[in-house]
Image (cartoon, helix red, strand yellow):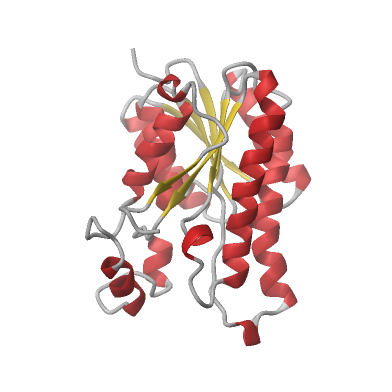
Amino acid sequence: MSKLTGKVAVVTGASKGIGAAIAKALAAQGASVVVNYASSKAGADDVVAAITASGGKAVAVGGDVSKAADAQGIVDAAVETYGRLDILVNNSGVYAFAPIEEITEEHFHKHFNVNVLGVLLVTQAAVKHIGEGGSIVNVSSVVSRITPAGSAVYTATKGAVDGITGALARELGPRKIRVNSVNPGMVATEGTHSAGITGADSDFEAWALSTTPLGRIGQPEDIADVVTFLVSNDARWVTGESLIASGGSR
């Protein structure tokens, strides 16, 4: 039997990149998956198609995690479609670097609304349904440890996510719900490539490679496998942890 047979999972921001890889990995282990997207319905539909083609179960559900009604709707869709909810992966996130002179209120609120408020709103909706043995994983970032220049706002949001993880692990522990975060290092995704963060001509990727002991850029599947471990019974004695998955960069 697969590790997650009979479980139902919500993965936010799952239309591409790390979120898509997580959705596919959880489905491959037997979970029924809600593939959330904010704007790319086509991307989410492609993820669902890939999962169902491999014999899994998945449905695409739109919603902006930074809005309470949408967050509730994402969770409601899981319960209405599959009858329960066992796993939540808070993966939705935005990122843009800016020096202190260029930080604006819009830049600040966009990052905190999605990366921090979104985690709280979806979790708030989900814990109404997640029971004993359930698991929540927040996708944070190694930037909360390495604090790169020009990332003050983004790094602040991921520091907040790490703090939320610890606080909710204590709050939900008595209900036997585990809460952990995974903190990726540099990962090659559609988003990082289009932003020029990764790619053959990227100075940032060159710097990341020089500081990564394992000598390569991460792939979405590298993070998905860590998340699969954290939500499975293999990690039954793990909660309140921020697991760095960065190839040794920190």
Q: Is residue 214 above or below residue 226?
A: below
- Quadrant of the drawing holding the C terminus: bottom left
Q: Hey, which quadrant is residue 217 in on the image?
A: bottom left
- Quadrant of the drawing holding the N terminus: top left
Residue in the image at 29% along x and 61% along y: 212
Q: Hey, which quadrant is residue 77 in on the image?
A: top right
Give left or right: position of 120 versus 219: right
Residue in the image at 53% along x and 59% along y: 144
Q: Nearer the viewer, residue 82 or 224?
A: 224
Give left or right: position of 160 versus 138: right
Residue in the image at 31% along x and 55% along y: 218
The residue furthest bottom is 101
Rendered location of residue 133, percent (x, y): 57, 18
Rendered location of residue 30, percent (x, y): 40, 21
The residue furthest top is 1
Give left or right: position of 77 versus 25: right
Q: Nearer the viewer, residue 166 or 127?
A: 166
Q: Nearer the viewer, residue 182 or 20?
A: 182
Q: Is residue 208 above or below residue 123?
A: below
Rendered location of residue 93, percent (x, y): 56, 56
Residue in the image at 55% along x and 30% along y: 239
Q: Is residue 51 above or below residue 195?
A: above
Q: Nearer the viewer, residue 123 or 73?
A: 123
Residue 218, visible in the rendered structure: yes
Q: Is residue 38 above or below residue 34?
A: below
Rendered location of residue 46, percent (x, y): 40, 45
Residue 49, visible in the rendered structure: no
The residue furthest right is 69
Give left or right: position of 6 versus 113: left
